[in-house]
Image (cartoon, grey):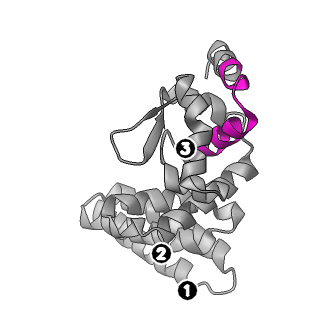
């Protein structure tokens, strides 16, 4: 993010209430577009409280309503990127882990398009204790990629699943080996062994 843009974003956000700035820090980790209920779960508050706290950010033009119900998005991707640059890695991992748990608890995984979102958040949240969740959902995402004949994506996902499995349970190597075998099968189909 160019320095001048970061300065403008920081200047605009600095005028907002602290609670709003705190929520923006969480929201930019969740993504450029985010569900209000998931942000509320990550924050540990109600959706109504989150909506009220984010109203100043909407008024300032940093956020806007999305076409999706109960969803907001950053007015420009560069706004989210500028805010994200100020969020530490450990905090990002905690937010990703909490977002993954929220999406699973809210049943988002029954919608195929959300499987990748859960896998993304869980994998990014491994350092915050989401390794088991990352293995489960990344493997599920890899299976979907294979079914769609997106073998290059599946190979990457099986590698991530193997990594997550080794963190989730360093003693039981079976899940890691299963993921590596699946990755090998994908590489064979790609003729990239």
Instruction: Give coordinates of residue 31: x percent, y percent.
Output: 52, 43
In the drawing, does residue 149 fall left or right of residue 163?
A: left
- Position of 111 compared to 86: left or right? left
How far is disc 1 from disc 3 in space, using C-alphas?
44 Å
How much space separates mark 3 and mark 2, taking CA atoms?
A: 41 Å
Please identify the dominant SS of the magenta region: helix
Q: Quadrant of residue 108?
A: bottom left
What residue did someone put label 3 on? 51
Find numbered disc 1 in the image and state the secondary structure of the residue it sits on.
helix
- Residue identifier under label 1: 174
Q: Which residues are magenta?
A: 11-28
Q: Residue at x 33, y 39 (%)?
A: 67
- Sequence-wise first label, 1 or 2: 1
In the picture, residue 147 is in which quadrant?
A: bottom left
Helix, strand or loop status at disc 2:
helix
- Residue placed most toward the observer, 59 or 13: 59
Q: Nearer the viewer, residue 137 or 33?
A: 33
Mark closer to the observer (3, 2)? 3
Is 132 situated above or below 88?
A: below
Spot occupied by residue 123 in the image (x, y as percentages of width and height): 57, 61
User: Is 150 on the left-hand or right-hand side of 180?
Assistant: left
**Front disc: 1 or 3:** 3
Residue 188 visible here: no
Give the residue drawn at x 72%, y 34%: 86
Q: Which percent across, then down, holds residue 135? A: 53, 72
Residue 179 is marked as 2
């Amino acid at each position: 993010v160019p320095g001048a843009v970061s300065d403008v974003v920081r200047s605009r956000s600095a005028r907002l209430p602290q609670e709003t700035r705190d929520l923006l820090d969480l929201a930019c980790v969740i993504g450029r577009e985010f569900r209000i209920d998931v942000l509320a779960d990550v924050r540990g508050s109600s959706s109504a409280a989150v909506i009220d706290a984010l109203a100043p950010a909407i008024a300032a033009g940093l956020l806007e309503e999305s076409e999706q119900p109960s969803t907001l998005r950053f007015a420009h991707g560069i706004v989210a990127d500028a805010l994200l640059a100020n969020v530490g890695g450990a905090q990002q991992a905690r937010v990703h882990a909490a977002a993954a748990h929220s999406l699973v608890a809210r049943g988002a995984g029954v919608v195929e398009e959300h499987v990748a979102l859960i896998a993304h958040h869980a994998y990014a949240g491994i350092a915050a204790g989401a390794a088991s969740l990352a293995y489960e959902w990344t493997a599920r995402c890899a299976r979907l990629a294979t079914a769609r004949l997106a073998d290059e994506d599946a190979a990457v996902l099986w590698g991530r699943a193997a990594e997550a499995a080794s963190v989730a349970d360093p003693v039981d190597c079976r899940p890691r080996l299963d993921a590596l075998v699946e990755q090998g099968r994908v590489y064979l189909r790609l003729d990239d062994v």
